[in-house]
Structures are given as structure tokens and as C-alpha cells.
């Protein structure tokens, strides 16, 4: 059976995702580090120690082909795609084999800019339209056949 796994550290659509998973009767797992606390009875919560990529590796180890991962982390998305998962970000963007390489390149450029203290534009506050778009895209993804 397909599951949804949420990279919940900093994820603004955790509760929305759990709600949709419950409605569709799909198991949902929240993975976060010890700096976050989730009390959502409808989902399994896995808490990992703080540390570089500890949540990411736990998520990857949970996956089966066809599972759905919610994350905004390009590196994690690449690992999940390699495991045969579908990966969606909090804005409803589907990461694919075709677009992940370019996104990883952008991440590397942005990291280099931060290290040289070049400013990167601030991300505006999240709005209700973004949640609607995410919900629409997640529901579309859930309609696809499970491999």
C-alpha cells in the first residue's frame, strides 16, 4: 500500500497533508527532528536526533516504490526519486528526474552566493492560494495508479 511521508521540519502543509491522507485512507508518516513536536493522532510521527540529513536518511529508508514524499529539500527529493517515490514540494511542484538536476544546480549556486554574502531574495509569506494549489496537486498525484 502506498504511503505519504512528510519531511516535516519547516513544512507548512503538514496538517493539510495528514488531513487528505486520512480522507483517502492512506497511511501518513511525519518525520522531524527533536526541535519539532507533532501531536497528530492520524499520522505516525518519527522523531530523529538533530543532525545533518538524519531526517532525510530516515525518510529514504522508509520508502517503497510509488510512495509520496512531501519536502522542499532538493537533495532529499533526488534521493527519493532514485527510490522510485513521487516527490511534491509544499507549493505543489512535482520533482522529477527531468527537473531535479537543474534544481540541484540552483541550490549549489545559492549556497555559494550565501557563502560570499550575496543576498538572496526573501521568500514572501505563504498565502491560502499556495495551500489550494498544493492540495490540488496532491489530490491529482493520489489519483495516479500505485505501481
Image: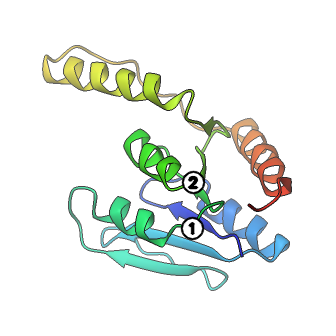
Which residue does the image show at 57% across and 67% down from the upper left? Answer: 64
Q: Position of residue 112 (x, y in %)?
A: 20, 21
Q: Which residue is mark 2?
A: 84
Binning the other alpha carbons within 10 Å of mark 2 as few (below 14), some (14 to 19) or many (20 upward) gives some
The one nearer the camera, 107 or 19, is 107
Under tag 2, what secondary structure? Answer: loop
Which residue does the image show at 70% across and 60% down from the upper left? Answer: 16
Is 11 placed left or right of 43 in the picture? left
Which residue does the image show at 72% across and 44% down from the upper left? Answer: 134
Q: Residue furthest front?
A: 147
Q: Position of residue 118 (x, y in %)?
A: 22, 13
Q: Say if residue 39 shows up in the picture.
A: no
The one nearer the camera, 142 or 51, is 142
Q: Taking 94 as reference, is 28 above or below it? A: below
Q: Taking 127 as reference, is 138 above or below it? A: below
Q: Taking 114 as reference, is 73 above or below it? A: below
Q: Position of residue 74 (x, y in %)?
A: 43, 39
Q: Which residue is mark 1?
A: 64
The one nearer the camera, 15 or 58, is 58
Q: Quadrant of the N terminus?
A: bottom right
Is 98 placed left or right of 136 in the picture? left
User: Are circles 2 and 1 on residues that touch, CB within 8 Å?
Assistant: yes
Which residue does the image show at 44% across and 27% down from the upper left? Answer: 101
Binning the other alpha carbons within 10 Å of mark 1 as few (below 14), some (14 to 19) or many (20 upward) gives some
What is the CA distance from the residue labelled 2 to the residue labelled 1? 7 Å
Q: Earlier in the sequence, mark 2 or mark 1?
A: 1
Task: Please identify the quarter of the rendering in which residue 119 is found.
Answer: top left
Give the number of the disc on residue 25.
Answer: none
Q: Say if residue 111 shows up in the picture.
A: yes
Is 11 placed left or right of 131 in the picture? left
Q: Position of residue 43 (x, y in %)?
A: 61, 79
The color scheme shown is rainbow
Amino acid at each position: 500500500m502506498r504511503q505519504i511521508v512528510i519531511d516535516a521540519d519547516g513544512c507548512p502543509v503538514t496538517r493539510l497533508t495528514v488531513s487528505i491522507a486520512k480522507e483517502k485512507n492512506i497511511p501518513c508518516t511525519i518525520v522531524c527532528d527533536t526541535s519539532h513536536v507533532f501531536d497528530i493522532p492520524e499520522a505516525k510521527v518519527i522523531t530523529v536526533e538533530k543532525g545533518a540529513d538524519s531526517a532525510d536518511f530516515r525518510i529514504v529508508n522508509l520508502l517503497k516504490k510509488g510512495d509520496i514524499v512531501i519536502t522542499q529539500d532538493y537533495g532529499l527529493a533526488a534521493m527519493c526519486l532514485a527510490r522510485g517515490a513521487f516527490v511534491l514540494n509544499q507549493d505543489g511542484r512535482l520533482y522529477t528526474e527531468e527537473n531535479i538536476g537543474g534544481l540541484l544546480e540552483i541550490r549549489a549556486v545559492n549556497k555559494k552566493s550565501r557563502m560570499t554574502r550575496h543576498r538572496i531574495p526573501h521568500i514572501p509569506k505563504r498565502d491560502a492560494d499556495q495551500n489550494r494549489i498544493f492540495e490540488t496537486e496532491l489530490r491529482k498525484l493520489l489519483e495516479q495508479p500505485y505501481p
